[in-house]
């Protein structure tokens, strides 16, 4: 345990993230990278970093899979709604097979809030900055070719 603790402490001191197991929660590393590098700037050359390039390819593949899955899901939903007709549920062998439930959730019209009650808007609404990966179109097109 002492050796593992010493390794972990050395990684913390040198600001190197730990290597996680393949089945570990990636959100832990994402949070760690945000904490290690809160003020990112500049560029890094990954011409010789095949692992980093493979990670970009894996990211693009996962994005394409999500997009394809979303399309399949929407098409299946349309077929289900078509089968339901005007009904709210479908039954197979005397049990509910699929049901269309009505749900609600609160929605705040922030534009109207700002116009009518600017003090409440200023007190309750905050602008949060976040970072998003952006891969140039030419790179995406080359990958998908």
Image (tube, rainbow, N blue to C red):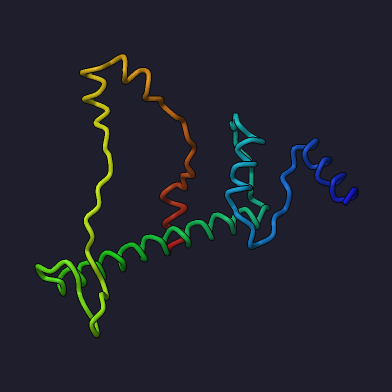
Whole-percent x, y for residue 76 in the image:
26, 70
Residue sticking out furthest to the bottom: 93
Left or right? Give the position of 119 relative to 52: left
Residue 68 location (% of width, % of height): 36, 65
Q: Residue at x 22, y 63 (%)?
A: 100
| Above or below, comparing residue 106 to residue 19 in the picture | above
120 lies left or right of 15 = left
The total number of labels drawn is 0
Query: Who's the residue at 47% across and 53% down the image?
Result: 139
Residue sitting at x 23%, y 82%: 94
The residue nearer to you, when weighing 17 against 5, is 5
- Horizontal side of 73 relative to 58 (left or right) equals left
The residue positioned farthest toward the left in the image shown = 86
- The residue sitting at the top extreme is 119
Q: Quadrant of residue 77?
A: bottom left
In the image as oriented, which residue stretches furthest toward the right? 2
Q: Quadrant of residue 21?
A: bottom right
The residue closer to the viewer here, 8 or 59, is 8
Quadrant (top left, top right, bottom left, bottom right) of the C terminus: bottom left
Residue 90: which quarter of the image? Answer: bottom left
**Image coordinates for residue 124, horizontal then vertical, percent:** 37, 23
Which percent across, then down, holds residue 137? Answer: 41, 49
Residue at the (35%, 18%) spot, across then down: 122
Residue nearest the observer in this picture, 128 or 55: 128
């Amino acid at each position: 345990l002492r050796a593992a603790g010493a390794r972990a402490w050395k990684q913390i001191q040198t600001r190197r993230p730990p290597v996680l197991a393949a089945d570990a929660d990636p959100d832990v590393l994402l949070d760690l990278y945000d904490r290690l590098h809160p003020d990112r700037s500049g560029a890094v050359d990954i011409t010789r970093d095949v692992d980093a390039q493979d990670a970009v390819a894996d990211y693009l593949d996962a994005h394409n899979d999500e997009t394809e899955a979303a399309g399949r899901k929407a098409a299946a939903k349309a077929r289900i709604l078509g089968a339901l007709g005007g009904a709210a549920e479908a039954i197979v062998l005397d049990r509910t097979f699929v049901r269309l439930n009505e749900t609600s959730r609160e929605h705040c019209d922030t534009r109207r809030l700002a116009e009518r009650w600017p003090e409440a808007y200023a007190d309750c609404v905050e602008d949060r900055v976040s970072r998003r990966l952006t891969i140039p179109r030419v790179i995406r097109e080359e990958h998908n070719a």
